[in-house]
Structure formats: structure tokens, C-alpha cells
Image: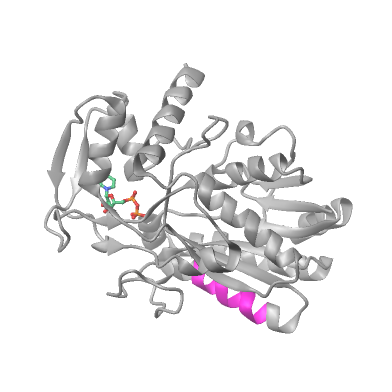
Amino acid sequence: MAVLVTGGAGYIGSHMVLALCDAGEEVVVLDSLVTGFDWAVDGRAQFVAGDAGDMALVGRLIAAHGIDAILHFAGSIVVPESVSDPLKYYANNTATSRNLIAAAVAGGVRHFIFSSTAAVYGMTGLEPVEEDAPLNPMSPYGRSKLMTEMMLADVAAAHPLRYGVLRYFNVAGADPGRRAGQSTPMATHLIKVGVQTALGQRAGMEIFGTDYPTPDGTCVRDYIHVSDLVAAHGLLLEHLRAGGESVTLNCGYGRGYSVREVLAGVEDVAGVALPVVEAPRRAGDPPSIVARADRVRELLGWRPAHADLKTIVRSAYEWERHLATRNR
Ligand code: UDP
């Protein structure tokens, strides 16, 4: 019995691989290395360079390793890019997922876990947002992910496959043991940009929008530590293997922080004042996105261990310092 992790050389996938290997699982990683790094894959896993949509390759891996579960992290994730190049997103996210699911069905894989996103909700006006909220994604990225959710539901009704969909909120931070982290050099995520600025790797940074209808005028997000997110996947895998039903779950903490609060946390951790300028709103940013996160706790018994904002920021900061020495 083994687990196939697509996108296992990427940010979240590489943390998942660590957790699975720590738990003694046999792990096969399939990653195209378009955005991932082969050095990010734990040495205990078997690494295969290739496309998650390559049905023949996936079929061979399923048969050779006795794969009973697929965790599908591979995909494209940049929202503005999905607006300018939607077909890339329908190819890399929707069509690739279709082929991977087809290979799973053909190979008799019974368990499938899919990385989805809070972007499937769009602007609900409902806070916190629960799993049953209306789904109106605002970008091709969100739609490309939602289509995969829909495919999984249809396929599970027709074939002996059960699935778990996790809708991620704002994933941040790094492995507390500094074994993995967010390594994309030009990543645009707030905490990444903040710690890079604190370390002098960027000359300065901007706050996008200070006139939102939020307590301090800046956007509010539900930041979740990558190791807690990965732990939820581990519990979900246990649930499916124990015969549990297919589920769709939010993955956040259920509480939000503003951009200013996050940057204050970075200043505190780094012990420096950040060179920050206030800039206009960034297109497409909803004022506030916070998860209603009861279901994942109740159903899976998930108990976050790194939920404190400073803990998240500190782990991101330490990883960035580690990367800087590594790349020197
Ligand atoms: N943000 C910012 N400056 C930056 C990067 C992000 O003010 O350099 C803001 C962004 O406008 C949003 C929040 O931080 O309100 C979180 O953005 P991020 O890109 O991290 O995640 P998103 O919520 O867009 O997925």
C-alpha cells in the first residue's frame, strides 16, 4: 500500500510528503518541476518527474506501487494569471485533474484527496463562510478548482471512489524543523513578502488598500499554518481508509487578521520596522475571507497546533533565513 502525492515538490505538497514519511507511509511523488523543486522532496519518498495528467504514467505508478490513495496538490495557483491565461488553468487544473481521476478509477484507487480553495466561494458577503455557502468563484482559477470538485462528486456517485476536498484559506508558514517552506522566489503572498522585506531582500513593500470596510481599513484573511493544514490531510486520509464518506471541508482557523496586524507581527518577530507604503487596492481582493471551520474539527477531530499568528510568521521568517544561506 502506498500513497501518490502529485505536486509533492511544491510548497504544500512537500510538507505533506514529510508528514506522510514521518508517519511511516510509502510515498510516491509525481511532480513536473515546472514550479516545484526536486530538492524539496524528502529523500524517504520516491520521486518521479512527470505530469499528473499523464494517464499512462499514473497507471503504471498505481500498479507498480499498489497505490491506495492519491493526494492531488499539483496545479496552477496565481489568480491574476488565471484571468489573463484562463486556458492554462483549465488545462493544468481541470483537465489534468480529469485525467488523474480517470487513471485512479481505471487503476482501482479508492481514496482521493483534492486541494481546493476558498476562491470557490467568491464574494458571499457571509462571514465566516461555511461549506454550504453559494459557490460563485470570481476567477478562472476558482472555477478551474470548482470544476474538479464537481467531477469528483459525479465520479464518486458512479464508481467505487471516495474523496475528500479541502478548501484552503491563506496558507503560510513553514515546517517548524526547517525541513521545508515556501521556496518560490517571487511569491506574492503577504507573509512571504513581509519576511523577505524584513530580511532586506526587498527594498520595501506595499499595503494594497487601506479603505476597506474592515476594522483598520485593510483586508482580513484567515491565515493557516501549513503544518496544521497538512495534519488535516492526514486525518482525512485516515477517515477515508476507515470507510468514511466523501466530504468537503474548509481548512482555516475561523479567525482573521488584517494586513496591518500581519505586518506588525512580522516587525515583532524580525525586530525591525518595515519600509511599507500604502497603495491602492489590488484588483479582485475581497475585504474579508474567514472560514467557518467547525466541520473539519468535528468530523476529523482536527486540533491545530500552530494557530498563533506569531508562530506562523516566525516559521516563515526562519525558513526565509535558511533559504538565504542555502542559496548563497
Ligand atoms: N497584500 C498586501 N501587500 C502585499 C501582498 C499582499 O497588502 O505585498 C494583501 C493583499 O492585498 C490581500 C492580503 O494581503 O488583502 C493577502 O494577500 P495574499 O496575496 O497573501 O493572499 P490572497 O488572499 O490574495 O490569496
> Magenta span has 153?
yes
Query: In which quarter of the view is residue 101 placed?
Result: bottom right
Left or right: 274, with 164 as reference point: left
Please report the residue visible at 45 percent of the width from the left and 79 percent of the height from the top.
Answer: 132
Task: Indicate the position of residue 104 as horizontal and vertical percent values.
Answer: 76, 66
Query: In the rendered view, would you say 259 is above or below 266?
Result: below
| Residue 290: quarter of image | bottom left
Write the start and end of the magenta stretch as one range.
145-155
Magenta stretch mostly in which secondary structure? Answer: helix
Q: Position of residue 136 (x, y in %)?
A: 38, 76
| Residue depicted at 83% across the width and 68% down the height | 108
Q: Is residue 96 something that shows in the picture?
A: no
Residue at 43% over, 28% down = 318
Judge whether residue 134 is colored magenta. no
Q: Residue furthest bottom?
A: 158
Q: Look at the image and tell me in which quarter the N terminus lies.
A: bottom right
Closest to the observer, 164 or 154 = 164
Q: Nearer the viewer, residue 248 or 235?
A: 235
Q: How is the image coloured?
A: one colour
Residue 10 position, x and y percent, is 56, 43
Q: Which residue is at 45% across, 71% downward?
A: 143
Q: Is residue 69 left or right of residue 92?
A: right
Query: Which corner quadrant of the image does residue 102 belong to?
Result: bottom right
